[in-house]
Amino acid sequence: MRRSARPDPGRYPYLDNRAGTQPGPLPLALAHRGFSPGGGENTMAAFERAVDLGFRYLEIDVRASGDGVVMVFHDEDLDRATDARGPIARRSASDLGGLSVGGHGGIPTLEALLLRWPHVRLNIDVKSDDCVRPFAELINRLSAHDRVLVASFSDRRRRAVLQLLERPTASSAGMAVDALLKLLAPLGLAGPVARIAGVQALQVPETYRGVRVVTRRFLRSCRAAGLQVHVWTINERAEMDRLLDLGVDGLVSDAADVLADCMTARSAWPQGGPRGG
């Protein structure tokens, strides 16, 4: 029986971020909705900018179109991010692909993203119940289990996805399990709770409603329970360095260029650093 305090890289390769001759796994650097300083979040253009910087991990959101296709998009409605209005669930995938997302292309399908960069791993927030089955079916069809981490603010929805997947797939806790683990981790109960909940990672803000979530004690408790801790959304270089020094396992950032420079300076960037390697 495996006794390591870290997630089993054989069972959950997504979480095993190794490069070259590095003796152990590197912290995960996740580009939040790609890299879109001029707009166009969650578009192929934003993902390409992040990949060009050297990112191997992208944080994305998915919802279902009206015809049941898994689309990469954050909001329930189109109003904020596109030139259209109304719920995304009322449009076909073809219609959604033709919209303008901040002038940077249409809404992509998850399948297109998975096929475009086979080496890239995706942290996927499943945003809607109608996306659960088509999402699981797509991951099963493409055998993409090792390339994705299933996330959702809803633990019920996250568990529904995991039950439909045909192979073990990494997952991070939703809000309810996050809160429970924050409460119970100092008591040494994080491991049993994580196993019951089916999670291998926690993805949390550094503070929530004035309460500090990420502390040395919390990180020690999570590490002892075999849980990685990823912190969002960190955009300042000083904060990145401080959290990495504290021992977090990953950072999610809108400032992908800043995070790439931070990781490179710390010799924690795969393939020699951004823009090449």
Image (cartoon, grey):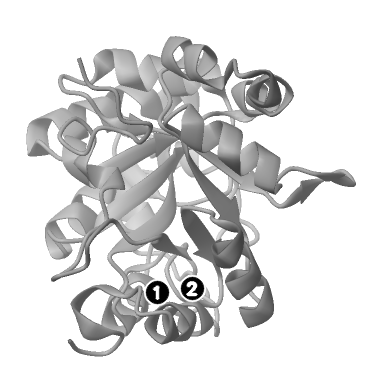
Residue 73 vertical position relative to residue 194 in the rendered view, above or below: below
In this view, 132 is above or below 92: above
Percent x, y for residue 43?
39, 67
User: Considering the image in quadrants, where does the N terminus appear?
Assistant: top left
Q: Which residue is mark 2?
A: 40
Q: Are marks 2 and 1 in contact (CB under 8 Å)?
A: yes
Circle 2: element type: loop
> What is the three-letter code of the residue carrying label 1?
Ala
The three-letter amino acid code for the residue at tag 2 is: Gly
Q: Nearer the viewer, residue 86 or 150?
A: 150
- What is the x, y in percent for residue 270? 24, 73
Cα–Cα span, label 2 and label 1: 6 Å
User: Which residue, given by chain and number where applicable, does mark 1 sit on?
Assistant: 46
Q: Position of residue 267 (x, y in %)?
A: 35, 79
Residue most extreme to the bottom: 275
| Residue lying at 34% horizontally and 70% vertically, measured from the top left | 47
- Give left or right: position of 62 versus 12: right
Q: Quadrant of residue 31?
A: bottom left
Quadrant where the image shows the C terminus: bottom left
Left or right of 93 on screen, residue 78: right
